Image (spheres, rainbow, N blue to C red):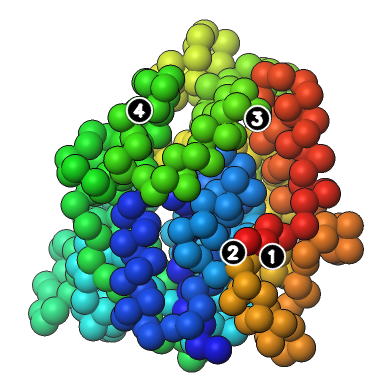
Amino acid sequence: MKATGVVVEYNPFHNGHLHHLRETRIATGADIVVAVMSGHFLQRGEPALVSKWSRTKMALEAGVDVVIELPYSFATQHAEIFSKGAITLLDRIGCESFCFGSEDGDIHAFDNTIQFIHTNQEQYDKYIRDFIQEGMSYPSALAGAYQRLEKKGSVIDLSKPNNILGFHYVEARNRFSSSLKAYTISRESAGYHDEHFASPSIASATSIRKSIFADGQNHEINSYLPDSSVQELYSYKDEYGSFHRWENYWTLLQYKILSSSKAELQDIYEIEEGIENRMVEYAKSSVSFEDFMTNLKTKRYTWTRLQRMLLHILTDTHKENMRKRHAHPEYIRLLGMNKKGREFIHQQKKDLSLPLISKLSSADQKAISLDVKAAEIYSLGLQNSSARKKLLHQEWSQPPIMI
């Protein structure tokens, strides 16, 4: 069976994802689509709207054949490490290719861009250092350095978020000499960070989440999601009482910051350059997570980077532990599959170079400890104690979802 992979968060699964899924099958000619999906916490350092189990159901109902989890140690990282974990897992599970959405839509331009940067690496790195010294954030420095280089031929726009991720996917594939073939398709209508609906049927996940929290009935989102996703969202809200957002965790984060010493905060992953001092200062006076972030934000630190720092404080994730875990994936955790997916997994099992986890109790507990802790913290975002207990129990008791 010919398998292709997609790297996803599905927060939540919407019509743009459905378009990507359908076009991926056409472009790659694959029999099987494997989605490597972030768990309870995401690349931008925020909690997923609904649990990984709920998002797995959405994916399977929409036509994904296999869903595996991208571990916390990769899912909550900047693009380079995030991509390394995702592409490695797709390679290890036996995919022949992967396909990503991009603003550019031309895979040859991605290959050209990687070659162009490698050819001009010394000057590129110098521009990055200069921009950072001027106080730019790292992503802005990368984009600025790229713009400074005199480009020739077909290259991509590295100021666009999906182009950036795609660049790192292809680069990750190249770095560990994988035989995975890369494909890309153009994103439809909505931009990655668009906060408003700009199309009758396709919208960004950002605008969908914004609408969900603004409209308790969620009626406005129905035309932007498959019916199965809409139903799953309603079911989750009914079963657990609420969706997840940073505000749900604000008092926990505030307590953690104010009860920790400066030395303890400095030991948290990604905390550097004295940012812990601003965190303590504004944790004392801020009345909400939004208020705290607005006060904390500086030119040097992007909103996303700050959220990742705060997430690692919330989960008490230390530098040494995280660095050990993101060297390379240590396991493949299976979240769900359909009938074709079961056949594929059965076919691949004997040749896998990483342990396949279908039951948490049988896993190497040290290797998976960050994901377990993330699930424990994620459950605290629910107000109802029985809902928290139920969600946390699911982490240990839920076998791979099968449809």
Q: Nearest the camera: 377 or 149?
A: 377
- Horizontal side of residue 85 vs 173, given as left or right: right
Quarter of the rendering containing residue 90: bottom right
Give the mark nearest the N terminus, 3 or 4: 4
Give the mark nearest the N terminus, 3 or 1: 3
How many residues crowd around disc 3 within 10 Å: few (fewer than 14), some, or many (20 or more)?
few
- Horizontal side of residue 112 vs 57, given as left or right: left
Q: Say the numbered circle drawn on residue 67.
A: 2
How many residues crowd around disc 2 within 10 Å: few (fewer than 14), some, or many (20 or more)?
many
Mark 3 secondary-structure assignment: helix
Which one is in front in this view, the residue at disc 4 or the one at disc 2?
A: 4
How many residues crowd around disc 1 within 10 Å: few (fewer than 14), some, or many (20 or more)?
some
Name the amino acid type tagged 2: Val
Q: Would you say residue 86 is visible in this rendering?
A: no
Q: Are marks 2 and 3 in contact (CB under 8 Å)?
A: no
What is the CA distance from the residue labelled 4 to the residue labelled 1? 33 Å
Residue tagged 4? 219
Name the amino acid type tagged 4: His
Residue 172: image x %, image y %? 47, 75
What is the CA distance from the residue labelled 4 to the residue labelled 2? 28 Å
- Horizontal side of residue 48 vs 303, given as left or right: right
State the residue at coordinates (37%, 45%).
225
Q: Are marks 4 and 1 in contact (CB under 8 Å)?
A: no
169 over 94 or under it: above or below = above
Residue 28: image x %, image y %? 37, 83
Q: Say the numbered circle drawn on residue 334.
A: 1
